[in-house]
Image (cartoon, rainbow, N blue to C red):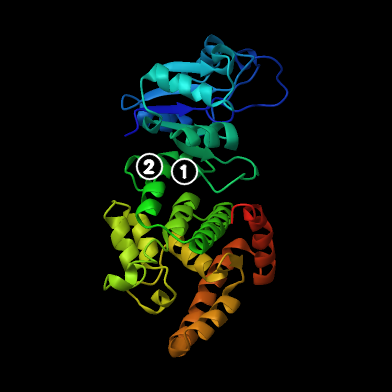
Amino acid sequence: MIKVVMFDWGNTLMEELSGFPGPMHIWGTVQATPGIHEVLTALRGKYNLVVATNAVESNAIMVQKALKRVDLDEYFDLIYTARDLGWTKSDPQYYRTIFDDQSIAPEQALMTGDALFADVEVPSRLGARTIWLRRSTEKLHQLPMMDGEITSLANWLPAFSMIEDEEIPSAAQLEELFHEYPPSNKLTRHVRMVAATAYLMAQALVDHGVDVSPIVVQRAGLLHDIDKRVWRDSGLLHGEKGAQILEGRRLHIIAEIVRRHQVFTILDPGRIPTTWEQKLVYLADKYIEKDQFVGISARFAHFMERYPESSDLLDAALPLAEQMETEMLLHLGQGRDLFYAGLKSRLRWLADLT
């Protein structure tokens, strides 16, 4: 349960405007980040709200003066700065000091900021929940660790609600699931690549104005084959058993994605992917052969070789999968060849992980 919600200062609570030297509280012009008042108003009185900033030029009093200029100071219980603490946010001790001062365990805190490493990766490794306010083209250094990803504070409350309602599995929950249903090394490489592929597609759609959660599809991609070793003995279909496992942990949204990812669900009106999250995980799984991006045609050709008894069903499913892909490409304004080339290029960062 989240008790403390932490916010970065520059480019999260307030805009870092160019052309103004010195501490922000003396700038000629200051500006609150759009949407932040609505977020803080919704949180006030329900959580301890704190500022966690890497500021070394401003101390807590100076940060408070800047916040006061945009009517944000009254929301916060405490302000922590790198200048006052003696550590920057790149050092885990920065966050440990806040957790100790707030008398909370790391998993009872949530951090929001725009800096991928300092605001997301460091507190995530300690066990805190995180939301990345993606305002740049900063590249991931690893598989996504954050629990929410947004490009505007207008989307912060829905992302937070999914975390608070425990619809987004934490790193600890993922570890627990994979301990109970351990994947082989080969399967681990496959699900990580599917998760990364679905995540990158979701990011691209978000950047083209489509409402889809990159983190939901990333988590679902990691979990889409959770039942791979047990479904045959369960009496349920592949995907159905995985959904049952996840529903038992109240991960209902991800469970429904897992239920609809299997190749033939596209032929079943009751199981066809309908949301963008469901469609992207379905497509990502049809792009990745083992741990390599091959695209839909090659993947279905492999299915034909592996399951010749299902050739009629595969022949029926392939054009529907291609139609789903076309729908996505229309939103992205790209042809298939260009999209494939760009996606494979962006997936190269996974080489060391798979």
Up the image or down, 354 lies above or below 94; here it is: below
Sequence-first tag of 1 and 2: 1
Residue that mark 2 sits on: 163
Res 76 visible: no
- The crowd level at tag 1 (other Cα within 10 Å; few <14, some 14-19, many 20+) is many
Q: Position of residue 63 (x, y in %)?
A: 55, 15
Residue that mark 1 sits on: 148
In the rendered image, which quarter contains the N terminus?
A: top left
Q: Position of residue 122 (x, y in %)?
A: 54, 33
Q: Looking at the rendering, which quadrant does residue 50 occupy?
A: top left
- Which type of secondary structure does the marked residue at label 1 adopt? strand
Q: Residue at x 50, y 52 (%)?
A: 214
Circles 1 and 2: CB atoms closer than 8 Å: yes
Q: Residue at x 53, y 9 (%)?
A: 61
Query: Residue 208 versus residue 176: which sits nearer the camera?
Result: 176
Q: Residue at x 48, y 36 (%)?
A: 124
In the rendered image, which quarter contains the C terminus?
A: bottom right
The kind of residue tagged 2 is Ile
Up the image or down, 106 lies above or below 59; here it is: below
